[in-house]
Image (cartoon, rainbow, N blue to C red):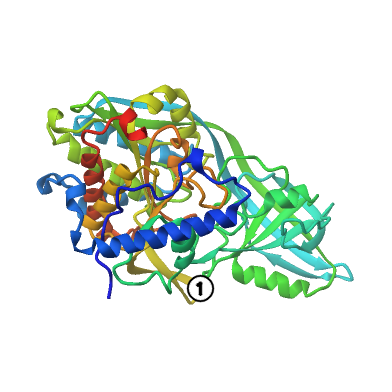
Amino acid sequence: MARPCVPAPAVPLQPRKDEAKPQHDRSHARRLLRATLLALAAAAAACSDSGSGTSRTGTVREELLTDSATMMGWIAEVTAQGIRRPGYPADEWIEGWARDQFLALGLEEVTLDPVAVKRWEPLGCALEAWHEDAPDERLALPCYPVPFTAATDGLEGELVLTDLAEGAGQDLAGSIALVEDRLLELPLTVYTALFARWWHDPAGEFTTAVQTLPFSSRLGGGIEAAAESGAVAFVGIVGAPWETDQYYVPYDAVVRPIPGIWLSPANGARLLDFRAGRATRARLVLERDLRDATSHNVTGVLRGASDEWVIIGSHHDGPWASAVEDASGVALVLAQARYWAQVPERERPHNLLFLLNGGHMSGGAGLIHFTTTRRDFISNEVVVEVHLEHAAREARAEDGRLVPTDAPEWRWWFTSSLPPLEEVVTGAICAEGLGRSLLMPPEGFPPDSMNPPTDAAFFHPHTPIVSFLTAPMYLFDPADTIDMVHEASLVPLTRATVRIVEGMRGQTAAGLRA
């Protein structure tokens, strides 16, 4: 029988930074975390008659909510513009559109703040392989350029299969590295045992479920390791359960010194079969346009009853037309702006700043600019930064393609480890019945990371964060179409965010940090 949803108790769930164990004692830290989670589960069982936890969150005015059809209409309008990478016409369009939406809602100080970005566009890609002892035996394969890698009009080298394992010490000097880059599959029990501080699993799925993430254990695909090992080029096989080579990773805008291409799973298998242990050479062609461009952060404000601030944001660019990544985030932010614009100023718990940042797909350029230029403001006047990304459906692979299901993707809520904030977030999740939710720490996932793997990383640790994110396996693929948006989540996520903002009523920046 599923346990009732019980908000996290108002007790510290892990040591404060000044009390933490030394970093080298990770096994002890993990045992401590597991023991803490078991204690939390016991506390939840003991408090199971406390209901939905709505007392820990503010109320929601139903008549002010944006319905899901309107939000889906916004998402459809955004995705209809085409590929929305930084510097592309579709991304320039959404900046003007978002500004107009903010103005129409009555937001003040609506601003387009320029941000320097890298504009990357693929123009062509080709791969040909042959055997050294039979040069007339040739295999030509379609491919897709790895973003931000070097161009070449025809680079040749020996094709060497490598796993680029840490410490393997393989000498790839002068060769073309061939890498099978399998998407990471994680059982949900890994999250609940090692990372999540609380979770809501009304269907009892966590013990058996496995999530396929949109990246491998090598977050950038391994091209850096290939270059450091002396390889002159990189050929990556996308290890996805559907057929694609259009994998927009990495997207950090770091220009790599060697060219790189992606092969689909089927074409990768063809190349591996062709190679079959025989000495094989390959020739790679990669054409792309890479130049400086300007994007914009779109901001607007609503004044409230406090002198302090809550920031609500997402990013407006994406790797493709990208309905989930992040037209859905744009819709969630607009729904918040629309809601709070209808609330009288004196009844808003704090001043509200709405942010749609640019340059997410250019190394987070927009948020680097925003958090650098407003550091004092963020550190001293912001009560909490709420980031909303990816209202996604879970998908399954079927005959080499992706099929959306009716289930939402597993929901991550990266939340600063502050008991009053955790109470509000978990209470909002309970109140809105947002199953498949995990309260994730701001640090330590991925292991040893000092920031969450979300846009809120740029705000942490300067201000408390609540960062909603899902990570469907198709996140960086053109398969991210409008049918992948989990429409049924849009209104509950909007309501939960309203509850979180209302739950900060009476909190101050200094008080919450203390």
Q: Nearer the viewer, residue 104 or 366?
A: 366
| Residue 472 visible in the snapshot | no
Q: Quadrant of residue 91?
A: top left
Q: Residues within 10 Å of mark 1 (few under 14, many from 20)?
A: few
Location of residue 286 in the rendering, given as x and y in whole percent from the top left corner: 68, 50
Location of residue 176 in the rendering, given as x and y in whole percent from the top left corner: 77, 56
Q: Amino acid at mark 1?
A: Gly
Location of residue 336 in the rendering, given as x and y in whole percent from the top left corner: 24, 41
Q: Nearer the viewer, residue 397 or 282?
A: 397
- Residue drawn where x is 53% and y is 43% of the image: 450
The residue carrying mark 1 is 400
Placement of 239 over or under 198, stated as above or below: below
Dot 1 falls on a residue whose secondary structure is: loop
Quarter of the image with the C terminus in it: top left
**In the picture provided, is 422 more to the left or to the right than 167?**
left
In this figure, what is the number of numbered marks? Answer: 1
Quarter of the image with the N terminus in it: bottom left
- Residue drawn where x is 47% and y is 36% of the image: 458
- Residue drawn where x is 18% and y is 44% of the image: 58
Placement of 399 over or under 27, stated as above or below: below
Q: Nearer the viewer, residue 383 or 76?
A: 383
**In the picture provided, is 11 more to the left or to the right than 169?**
left
Location of residue 179 in the rendering, given as x and y in whole percent from the top left corner: 69, 62
Outermost residue toward the left? 63
